[in-house]
Amino acid sequence: ISATSVGADAIARMQREARILAWLEHPGIVPVYDIGELDDGRMFYVMKLVQGPRLDDHVAERPLTERLRIFTRICEPVAFAHAHGVIHRDLKPENVMVGPFGEVLVLDWGASLMLDLRLGSSDSSTDTTGRPVEIVGTRGYMAPEQARGTTTDPRADVYALGGILHFLLGGGPPD
């Protein structure tokens, strides 16, 4: 990605995503192996190649027990991220991949936010740098507080997990 083609905000977001992914070593999160800048100024990061369908494509006609097993496997890397001060902020079926051997991966950490765990409760409209929190996420999976831009709290991810569970049980996104 080149700063001239997408803008400085997109580059900063990509760099933040790469740093967060490098920080979160978990089997349910795709590892980052390298990050850098090419001679022509384009930024890159190298990740493990992942293959398999997205959750929304995978679950059709799957038995309830398998859908619930997958849901618990989604919760594991999210809980790990929360324990390390990171919230995803855009959990949805399209950001989950099921691998050929049943592995479950939570993808697309580009909207994620790293919290300062020393502050205790982080329920505010600013991040750890004091900048306003950008409203990111996907309608139907985004907590109401997140949609208003007033939360940087892991509970927003828990709300999104509820939306994913609704999808897995009902076959469609929440209203």
Image (cartoon, rainbow, N blue to C red):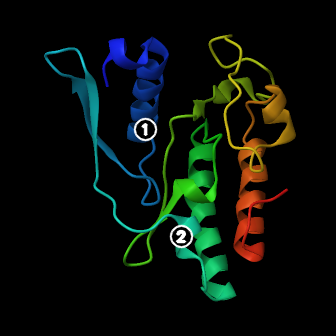
Name of the residue lying farthest toward the front: 5
Along the viewing direction, whichever of 160 and 173 lies nearer the viewer: 173
- At label 2, counting other C-alpha atoms closer than 10 Å, the crowd grade (few under 14, some 14-19, many 20 or more) is few
Q: Residue at x 45, y 44 (%)?
A: 24
Q: Is residue 136 above or below residue 66?
A: above
Does the residue at mark 1 contact the one at mark 2 (Cβ under 8 Å)?
A: no
Classify mark 1: helix, strand or loop. helix
Question: Which residue is identified by label 1?
Answer: 23
Residue 10 position, x and y percent, is 46, 22
Q: Is residue 152 above or below residue 140?
A: above
Classify mark 2: helix, strand or loop. helix
Residue 145 position, x and y percent, is 85, 34
Q: Of circles 1 and 2, which is in front? A: 2
When asked about the image quadrant of residue 146, the answer is top right
**Residue type beneath disc 2:** Asp
Q: Residue at x 64, y 70 (%)?
A: 71
Along the viewing direction, whichever of 45 and 139 lies nearer the viewer: 139
Tell whether 143 sits left or right of 79.
right
Q: Kindly identify which numbered label has been placed on residue 88.
A: none
Along the viewing direction, whichever of 31 and 170 lies nearer the viewer: 170
Q: Is residue 156 above or below residue 123?
A: below
Circle nearer the N terminus (1, 2): 1
Question: Which residue is identified by label 2?
Answer: 57
Along the viewing direction, whichever of 20 and 40 lies nearer the viewer: 40
**Residue type beneath disc 1:** Trp
Give the spatial CA distance, label 1 vs label 2: 29 Å
Q: Residue at x 60, y 84 (%)?
A: 66
- At label 1, counting other C-alpha atoms closer than 10 Å, the crowd grade (few under 14, some 14-19, many 20 or more) is some
Q: Is residue 47 above or below residue 68?
A: above
When asked about the image quadrant of residue 89, the answer is top right
Residue 57 position, x and y percent, is 53, 70
